[in-house]
Amino acid sequence: MSAKAQGRGGANKPVRMQLQDLLFSQGFGTRRICQGLIEQGYTRVGWLDQATVCDDPWAEVEVQRDWPFVVQGEQWFYWPKAYLMMHKPASTECSQKPSHWPSVYSLLPAPLRQRPQKSAVQGVQAVGRLDQDTTGLLLMTDDGTLIHQLASPKHHVPKVYDITTEDPIEPDAIERLLAGVVLNDSPVPVRAQAIEQISDRVILMTLTQGKYHQVKRMLASVGHLVVGLHRSKIGALSLPAELLAGQWRALGLAELDLIRQSA
């Protein structure tokens, strides 16, 4: 899915910069590579159908969020920070160095994976991880502050999981999950904030903690094997029905506000 999504997050103050620095800030490579893209006529300013070629790497442009430009025939927008949502498909890993399955980062275009940061890690990062067989809402950003706020256990950001079990879930099991169960890596009980039973084998469970394989381990502690796991919501932000597995798009301003309020 390309960068042609609506509204982008982040401050919208105009900034003056050289065109070479603009491309560098958006992940198109080193400054020398960006200079070459511009000098060879691969960079145009404006919307795809009416953009004009600019072959001067040192030309100054005034940009703000969603300022349009074209590189090698593809439309892009200037993002001070990138805020994305992805519908993570099954059989993918939330790692840039996957062990057995393709990485979710392979679903993103190279510039989003290469956006420069002050730290050694480049590009957007997944906010938390989902198991390789778990699907659903995955947030990705290069805003380190927001990543920390959403991932920190101190903030108790609720996440909703659609869970399908192999056998019917009895009321007693639901009561135990709400009361709290002890997992083998900690004596402190973990509990579901809320549970809605959809059918005899399907529940929606809200958690405000994030431990390794937590959902599967919680269900196993009450005698149930999870055969389907999907994250449908983070904070007040839900995964849109039209965003299909493997697709991504930028967060709109209202969606970004929902996430920030949750953190």
Image (cartoon, grey):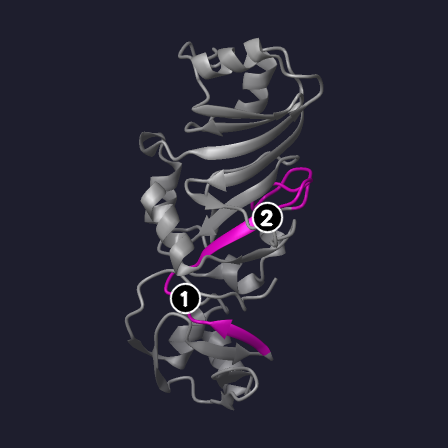
Quadrant of image for the N terminus: bottom right
The residue closer to the viewer here, 128 or 203, is 203
Q: Which residues are magenta?
A: 74-102
Q: Quadrant of residue 210?
A: top left
Q: Is the residue 8 above or below the residue 245 in the image?
A: below
The residue closer to the viewer here, 255 or 74, is 255
Q: Does residue 51 appear to the left or right of 165 in the view shown?
A: left
User: Would residue 97 be seen by someone viewing this image from the given angle?
Assistant: yes
Spot occupied by residue 14 in the image (x, y as percentages of width and height): 29, 75
Q: Is the residue 164 above or below the residue 48 in the image?
A: above
User: Would residue 94 be seen by someone viewing this image from the given angle?
Assistant: no
Q: Residue at x 38, y 40 (%)?
A: 150
Give the secondary structure at mark 1: loop
Spot occupied by residue 136 in the image (x, y as percentages of width and height): 58, 42
Spot occupied by residue 61 in the image (x, y as percentages of width and height): 35, 83
Q: Which residue is mark 2?
A: 87
Spot occupied by residue 141 in the image (x, y as percentages of width and height): 44, 52
What is the number of the mark on residue 79?
1
Q: Residue at x 52, y 23 (%)?
A: 214
Q: CA distance from mark 2 to mark 1?
A: 21 Å
Check residue 146 for magenta coloring: no
- How crowded pointer 1 is (Cα within 10 Å; few <14, some 14-19, many 20+) is rated as many
Q: Amino acid at mark 1?
A: Trp
Q: Is the residue 229 above or below the residue 42 in the image?
A: above
